[in-house]
Amino acid sequence: MMEGANTDDEGFTDGDSPEDVPMENVPDTAEDDVLNDKSASVYYTVQNTTEGTNYSKQEVEQMMKIDSYQRKIDTCHLCGECWYDSKCSAACRECEGFPMTRPCPVCNGQCNETWTRNVKLSHSYHEAHWEGTCKLPPEMQQAFMIRKFMDSSEETLTESMQDLSTT
Ligand SMILES: [Zn+2]
Ligand SMILES: [Zn+2]
């Protein structure tokens, strides 16, 4: 969008405007790589805002504090995988094979709804709890539940049926 304004800093125009590009002003390339690395979550947050890099050191520290706090909260108590980092274990009851979100468990994602983990309940019951709504018509949801119930002898299914009747 603003290509024209930045061409002098790109380094492609070597020697074109020497007075504008003093040696000391050349950005540290290593730092530049970090800023452009979307997997670095802290910088990703900064990039997501329209203000760009106008954050003070304090604000960034505050954000990192919230980040690590959130990471601590969103970690499985049973197996220790960090849901916040999109990690989970398939065999773990508290994880149930998904991190912070999962496709609709009623219809196995057929309705394209994403359910969100209730972290507090997952922790207190040591069992995954999800919040969401299946967008399929009720009779289809029922059909899915019955089919799941008949198809599988997995203990977790009976448990989730019990959960539905108690809430
Ligand atoms: Zn777990
Ligand atoms: Zn659904």
Image: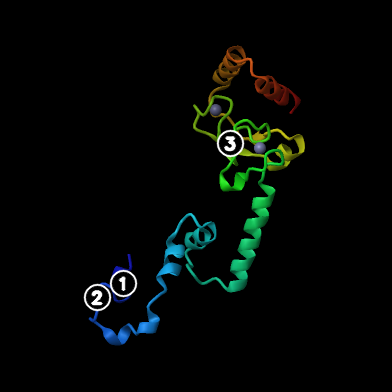
The residues tagged by marks 2 and 3 sit, at their Cα atoms, a distance apart of: 49 Å
Q: Nearer the viewer, residue 49 or 140?
A: 49
Left or right, residue 69 beside residue 139: right
Contact? badges 2 and 1 (CB < 8 Å): yes
| Quarter of the displayed picture in which ligand 2 can be seen | top right
Name which residue lies at 62% across and 57% down.
Answer: 67
Name the residue beneath numbered marker 3.
98
Q: Secondary structure at mark 1?
A: loop
Amino acid at the residue labelled 1: Glu
Q: Residues within 10 Å of mark 2 (few under 14, many from 20)?
A: few
Q: Earlier in the sequence, mark 3 or mark 1?
A: 1
Q: Position of residue 163 (x, y in %)?
A: 72, 26
Q: Which residue is mark 2?
A: 13
- In the orientation shown, which residue stands out farthest toward the bottom? 19
| Among numbered discs 2 and 3, the one appearing first in the sequence | 2
Q: Which mark is residue 10?
A: 1
Q: Position of residue 79 (x, y in %)?
A: 67, 39
